[in-house]
Image (cartoon, rainbow, N blue to C red):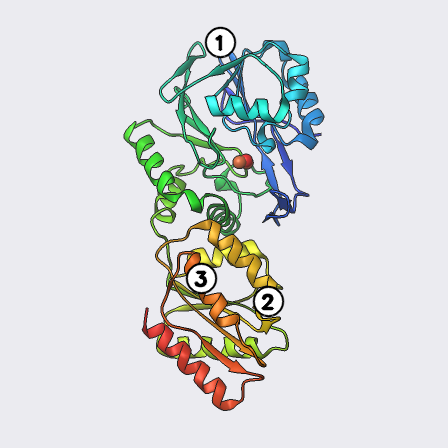
Amino acid sequence: MQTSKKITEKVTWVGKVDWELTKFHGDELSTRKGSSYNSYLVRDKKVALIDTVWLPYDKEFVNNLKREINLDEIDYIIVNHAEIDHSGALPELMREIPNTPIYCTNNGKKIIQGHFHEDWNFVTVKTGDTLDLGESKFIFVEAPMLHWPDTMFTYMTGENILFSNDAFGQHYATESLFNDKVDQCELYGEAIKYYANILAPFSALVKRKINEVLEMELPVNLICTSHGAIWREDPLQIVHQYLEWADNYQENQITLVYDTMWNATRRMAEAIAEGIRSADPTVTVKLCNAAKDDKNDIVTEIFKSKAILAGSSTINNRYLSAMGAVLEMVKGMKFKNKKAAAFGSYGWSGESVKLLTADLKEAGFEVVNEGYRTMWMPDEDALKACREFGKQFAESL
Ligand code: FEO
């Protein structure tokens, strides 16, 4: 049983902390620190519920909500985003209060109907529309493609709360609820992983929408996200961080991502890394084995990098499939302003470097050379050449 938690006099958290969640979006996103589905009950002269929880917790959610309030007292339901992790408990809730109006964007209505095939009492809203709660009011702000077409933010006057849904969230289970009560490294790590793996493709829209909201000059005391910790201490820190991440983000880092059959390509990677460090001792160099490391962590490391090197042995005239999975994800992320090159070992035909180079270009990287390959296990001369390749790569950035 999940207990509700008071956030302000008028706002109570009534969501679900999911400590067991390890995968999200099917198998696409790892959530090693769990997650939460944050739902908020707002009690003013009118009562509103903002978002619900993921489908498997629908009954638990509605039962907990009943302990908090007589469901008939809920005047409005706000659906900031129709993805199932937030709208999953709607059918269970609407069985109890079928006529309660659901406020959402026009796209939100279509998606909710597409999911549940119900014709509930929808009230569609646009940017600037308001909903009077008695003392406070809600101001709605559409935020399409952050990260679905239906997404919107809801701002509550008086309490000065931005209910931002996915934006500024983290897949991070915590009973502490607020950003100032959790481990700051964990919080930052999960926030950047969330941005790199979910929001990065929409960076241009992120920048535009944040600037639009900042221009509204609304005071913000809290940013209540739909996942993870609520931003209470210096809440705008995450907004400014998003502006940085959305602006062709890079750190002084080079990441080598590779897969290897008999360790020849791994040895190449290590020698190339040495060469990079010899050219620039200030650069952070990280090596990731695509077959062993978490793919979303690799995507996050690539997001942080100013350049990457992709390596693979050749197998069946192709490169190894674990590299395919990473590159396929990276193509979708539409990272900008990053350089790259390829490397790999081979026995006879040796297509991997050429194919990796082509895919790096397709993923939007500026490929700085034709790559480097060695035959069979690299000997001392080949390792020396790898070090030189790494050195020249670093110098070319
Ligand atoms: Fe947390 Fe887009 O759902």
Q: Residue at x 37, y 46 (%)?
A: 246
Q: Residue at x 70, y 21 (%)?
A: 63
Tell me the amino acid under the disc marked 3: Leu
Q: Residues within 10 Å of mark 3 (few under 14, many from 20)?
A: many
The verdict on label 3 being within 8 Å of ligand 1 is no
* Rendered image: mark on residue 250: none
Tell me the amino acid under the disc marked 1: Lys
Alpha carbon distance from label 3 to label 2:
15 Å
Label 3 with label 2: CB-CB less than 8 Å: no
Sequence-first tag of 1 and 3: 1
Q: Which residue is mark 1?
A: 45
Q: Residue at x 68, y 21 (%)?
A: 92
Quadrant location of the N terminus? top right
Q: Is residue 301 left or right of residue 83?
A: left
Q: Which residue is mark 2?
A: 320
> Does dot 1 land on a helix, a strand or a loop?
loop
Q: Which residue is mark 3?
A: 360
